[in-house]
Amino acid sequence: MNPSKGTQLVRLHRTQRTALPRLLGSLLLVTAAGISSVGAAPGGAAAHSGQASATAPRSLGQIVPAPAEVKAGGSPYTITAGTKIRVDDDSGEAWRIGTYLAGVLRPSTGYALPVTDRGGSDGIRLRLGSHDSELGAEGYTLKSSHGSVTITARGPAGLFHGVQTLRQLLPADVEKNSRQAGPWQVAGGTVTDAPRYAYRSAMLDVSRHFFSVTEVKRYIDQLALYKMNKLHLHLSDDQGWRIAIDSWPRLATYGGQTEVGGGVGGYYTKSDYKEIVRYASSRYLEVVPEIDLPGHTNAALASYAELNCNGVAPPLYTGTSVGFSSLCAPKAITYTFVDDVVRELAALTPGKYLHIGGDEAHSTSHDDYVTFMNRAQAIVGTYGKTVVGWHQLTGATPVAGAVAQYWGYDRTGAAERKQVADAAKNGTKLVLSPADRTYLDMKYNKDTKLGLAWAGYVEVQRSYDWNPATYLEGAPEDSILGVEAPIWSETVTNSDEVEQMAFPRLPGVAELGWSPASTHDWDAYKVRLAAQGPRFSALGIDYYRSAQVPWPAQ
């Protein structure tokens, strides 16, 4: 999944900002049947507005992910010095979301934007308790008119997602940390929106190179604008163990002290990890921790000799080869180790899922692999979590409710693909991460400085132009939980480099996870994506300006 490649060792720490980038573009009118493009000026002017394109509000359809339904019309709403953010008086969550929104808008508008629970029909209104069952836990409606913008949702996550839509509908300068000129208008009409898939994830590999809590938070903020709801943290690998485990302390203090190329590495204390989980939760993302087993374990094997079949600890590893390490499946202490790690990690993780890896276990015999993965799955269940594994898990016996994450690609052999599809037919759920579509560490082209190319080059159109429902032949459509965009860190060492590889591909994967299939259209999407360039710049994201996208002139 991540074969060898060299890396740069410069670590650049950037100050954390609320970094929630967004993509805007072609005017889309969304009906119950889907989205149809009717064109828009580069600045996003509404055709009916009569205003100069530089100041006209953006079309309600110019957001990413594309909304399920848009009904445009009526006068725009303008945020002014007198605007209040009004929340339900009985909802602490609505109040917290309102406070978050005020924090986003105040620096750029210069307005006080007080958050209040006093009644009123004007201003920005955040309301919980919609009776529209089709919205589900994450859907929302946004209604904009001359006097107010009202976001209504059944649950807090939906309200938060609606706030992200509001951010996108405002000019890109709203993302800046200093006062800007405005005006701050939201086009008139209604957006009704809910996700296609329940599982919309991005993975950050903190094992090959370590990322600070601040860097992880920055990425969380960027994921949130795209309505992603999972952060998969790859916490252990051959090159480093990144989470403190009290019962096996050398995992972090010894196994975490290096990284690819021999850098200083690092690890998260339990307090650090709890802070990441808390911050993700405040953005309505669930953390999915991964301890990769039984391969990708050299950091653990180097930390404790008894985990090796021969009782000899190997040296720490700073290269990028894969498949050479394995826990000792016949030893009883191996399962004591797994039980301790899973128990402590599960106690720190309020979310539903715990990922146990299972990929590239080339040094583990098939029989040992099956024995190990079956026992490891049972341990995860003991501590109340749903097991997730890379799709090689389907070569063992997936437990009821297990999730297999497919990372194969278009040229993966038919037998391997069928094994995964057959497991899906028998009840295993799937998260799709095809490496030649969604792996954000793949090079865009031969001239890309960062990244790998073992799965091929992955340009922006390729990362967007596939359908999760039909991608894996034979897998029932209802077996697809959703999609994930992983970024492996052999060559990626800091937030700047993460963003160069993630943007602009990440928003397209987010759209595949959220938007109705009827909205999927590359020609319309690339125009919305292009119009996001100024927003990326406002957020300080040094994105890759793909030649496939008609970016505005800088």
Image (cartoon, helix red, strand yellow):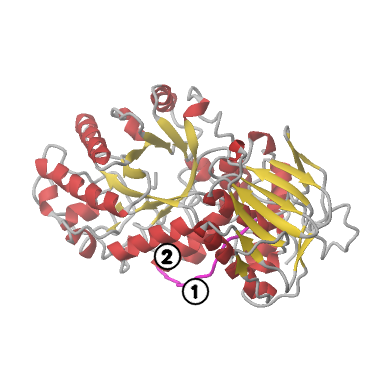
Residue 459, position in %: x, y?
A: 59, 48
Q: Nearer the viewer, residue 94 or 437?
A: 94
Can residue 286 be seen from the camera position used here?
yes
Say if the magenta span includes residue 13: yes
Horizontal side, residue 301 vs residue 290: left or right: left
- Label 1 SS: loop
Residue 323 in which image quadrant: top left
Residue 370 to residue 447: above or below? above
Residue at (20% x, 29% y) in the render: 367
Q: Nearer the viewer, residue 354 or 497?
A: 354
Q: Which residues are magenta?
A: 8-22
Horizontal side, residue 241 vs residue 171: left or right: left
Q: Nearer the viewer, residue 381 or 261?
A: 381
Label 1 Cα crowd, 10 Å radius (few <14 / some 14-19 / many 20+)? few
- Label 2 SS: loop
What amino acid type is highlighted by mark number 2?
A: Gln
Q: Residue furthest right?
A: 50
Quote the CA–CA distance across marks 2 and 1.
21 Å
What amino acid type is highlighted by mark number 1?
A: Thr
Residue 547, position in %: x, y?
A: 68, 53
Residue 360, position in %: x, y?
A: 32, 40
In the image, which disc is placed on residue 67?
Answer: none
Q: Quadrant of the C terminus?
A: bottom right
Say if the magenta span includes residue 268: no
Horizontal side, residue 445 vs residue 340: left or right: right
Residue 427 in which image quadrant: top left
Eye-nearest disc, 2 or 1: 1
Q: Which residue is mark 1?
A: 15
Q: Which residue is mark 2?
A: 8
Q: Main secondary structure of the magenta part?
A: loop
Label 2 Cα crowd, 10 Å radius (few <14 / some 14-19 / many 20+)? few
Residue at (60% x, 68% y) in the render: 115
